[in-house]
Image (cartoon, rainbow, N blue to C red):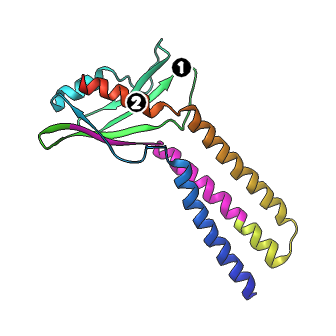
Amino acid sequence: MQISLLILIAAISVSVICVVFCVMLLCGFPGGNTGICFQSKYSVPESLSRLSSVCLPYNSDTLVSEWLVGSVKTSSVTLQRRTRGMKSSFNPVFTGRFKQQDGQVVLSGKFAMAPNVQVFLALWIVGIISIFALCVFVLVSEHNQGALEGIAISGIMLTFGIWLVRTGKSSSADDIAWLKNNIKNAVQT
């Protein structure tokens, strides 16, 4: 029984490490989770107005192939690229706010997946790895061969989740550069 307890503790420890690693791997965008600042040539109200003029509401549709959607307020800015005929929850979202810094108006923020997508992925990974750890524990402690099915299914589900995120991220690979360009054009030209 002592060995079974040690195996369970080891399985839980490995699960926690895997969860942390997977969340860091899957939720990050290359160059996206670090802070970024855009200096503006204009005052805060003028910068807000200029950025608002190129940004459409989230529920809007247009005839162009891609457009900027989001919300531009004094307290916060949230921007995302929308592409006609394509819907992806894995698109990066810029979140930030305008502020005065050393006499300059600066829009500072970061690019990341939407928080609800990050929570969903974390729960997906934690759930699958917990099921995997439980099946390993049952297999080792009780020698129940039925646990092999649970191990196989959790492996398939984890692989599917990783494939889904990778596919979603590759479909929006140039979104950060596109967003940066649109933000710069609005507040610097």
**Helix, strand or loop status at disc 2:** helix
* Residue 186 drawn at (x, y percent): 28, 24
Can you see residue 131? yes
In the image: residue 49, left or right of residue 110 = left
Pick the front one: 188 or 124: 188
Seen in the picture, residue 157 relative to 143 is either above or below; the reply is above
Q: Amino acid at mark 2?
A: Leu
Mark 2–mark 1 Cα distance, whole angstroms, equals 16 Å
Q: Residues within 10 Å of mark 1 (few under 14, many from 20)?
A: few
* Residue 79 drawn at (x, y percent): 38, 32
The region drawn magenta spans 106-132
Can you see residue 75? no
Seen in the picture, residue 49 relative to 129 is either above or below; the reply is above
Q: Which residue is mark 2?
A: 179
Q: Which residue is mark 1?
A: 84
Is 109 within the magenta? yes
**Helix, strand or loop status at disc 1:** loop
Pick the front one: 80 or 102: 102
Q: Residue at x 74, y 55 (%)?
A: 155
Q: Residue furthest bottom?
A: 2
Q: Residue at x 27, y 33 (%)?
A: 73
Q: Amino acid at mark 1?
A: Arg
Q: Residues within 10 Å of mark 2 (few under 14, many from 20)?
A: many
Q: Residue at x 75, y 73 (%)?
A: 137
In the image: residue 188, left or right of residue 110 = left
